[in-house]
Amino acid sequence: MSNFEVIIYEKQNDIGYVTLNRPEALNAYNLQMRDELYQVLGAIKDDPEVKVAIFRGAGERAFCAGADLSEFLTAPSPVIARQVRWERDVWGLFLSITKPLIAALHGYVLGSGIEIALCCDIRLASEDVQFGLPEVGLGIIPAAGGSQTLPRLIGGAQALEILLTGRWIKAEEAHRLKLVNQVVSRHELLPAAERLANKLKAYSPIALSYAKQAITRGLDLSLEQGLELEANLGDCLFNVNKEG
Ligand code: COA
C-alpha cells in the first residue's frame, strides 16, 4: 500500500512499515518526504488496524542523511517558512502518536534522521550506524525538535557536546549513551524490530497507549504532577477495562 514517491508505507499484520525511500540521496529528508511523512503519520495515528509502527531507511548506506542540502534554506522568507511549519507540523504530529513507534537504524543517521529516531519510542541500531547532528557546522540549529528531544533522552551535557561539536557517534557509544536501546548485526535489524513489534502488538492497545503517555508526558512534569498523571491514566484504564 503506497502511492508515495519518497516513502513506502505498508501495513502487514497490524504493523505499519514506514521506509524512507531515496537511497540514491541517502534518504535525505526533502519537502516531498515531509509532506508524505505527514500523511503517513496521520494514517498511523488514526488507523485502528495499525498497532505499532517500524521506521527504517531504504538501501544499504543510510537511515537518513539529514535535511536535503540541495533544498537547504530555500524557503523564500522566514515568515513563509514558519507558515509552512504550522501547516505541516510533522514533529508535533509524530510526538502526538500514542502507539509504540520503533526505529530500525542503519548507516548514516544525521540531522533530521536522528530527529525522526528521537520521535520514536524504541531505537534499534545495526553495528554500522553513525549518528551526527551537523547543523551547527552548517550555521543553523536543529529544526525538528532535536535540541529538545535529545537532552531529554541522554541528558543535557551529552546532548550539548554532540550538538556543539557535531561529533559523530558510532554504535557502541550510542548504546552506552542510551541513544539506542539495542545494537544488532545488520541482517538482524529488521527481524529484531519485527520481533519487538509482534510482542507489543499482542498487548492491549489502550494499555500501551496509556503506558507510553505516562512516561512521555510525565517527563515534562514535576514528580507530583507525574504521579497525578499516572493515577489519572490508571483510573481511566481501570474504567475502560471494567466496561470492556
Ligand atoms: N542532502 C542531499 N543529498 C545528499 C545528502 C543530503 N543531506 N546526503 C547525501 N546526499 C547525496 C549526495 O549528494 C550523493 O549524491 P550523488 O551521488 O548524486 O552525488 C549521494 O547522496 C551519496 O552521498 P556521498 O556524499 O557521495 O556519500 P559519501 O559516502 O561520500 O558521504 C556523507 C556520506 C553522509 C558523509 C555525506 O553524504 C554527507 O556529509 N552528507 C550531508 C550530511 C548533512 O550535512 N546533512 C544535513 C544535516 S542538517
Image (tube, rainbow, N blue to C red):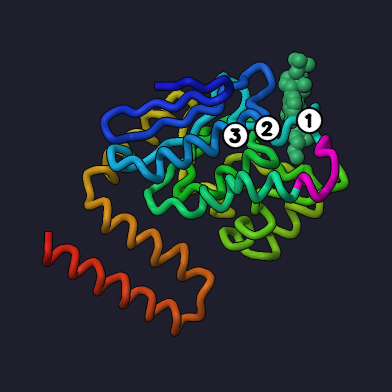
Mark 1, Cα crowd under 10 Å, few <14 / some 14-19 / many 20+, is few
Task: Give the farthest residue toward the bottom.
Answer: 224
Q: Under 8 Å from ligand 1: the CB of mark 1?
A: yes
Do labels 1 and 3 touch, CB within 8 Å?
Answer: no
Percent of width and height locating residue 50: 32, 39
Q: Which residue is mark 3?
A: 35
State the quadrant of the N terminus. Answer: top left
Say left or right for 163 vs 106.
right
Which residue bears the numbered disc 2?
31
Helix, strand or loop at mark 3: helix
Mark 3 neighbour class, 10 Å CA radius: few under 14, some 14 to 19, many 20 or more? some
Label 1: which residue? 71
Evaluate if marks 1 and 2 touch, with contact meaning CB atoms under 8 Å apart.
Answer: yes
Three-letter amino acid code of the residue under disc 1: Glu
Separation of disc 3 and disc 2 at Cα?
6 Å
Residue 52 to residue 82: above or below: above
Above or below for 7 versus 109: above
* Callout 2 amino acid: Leu
Residue 61 place in picture, x, y as percent = 62, 23
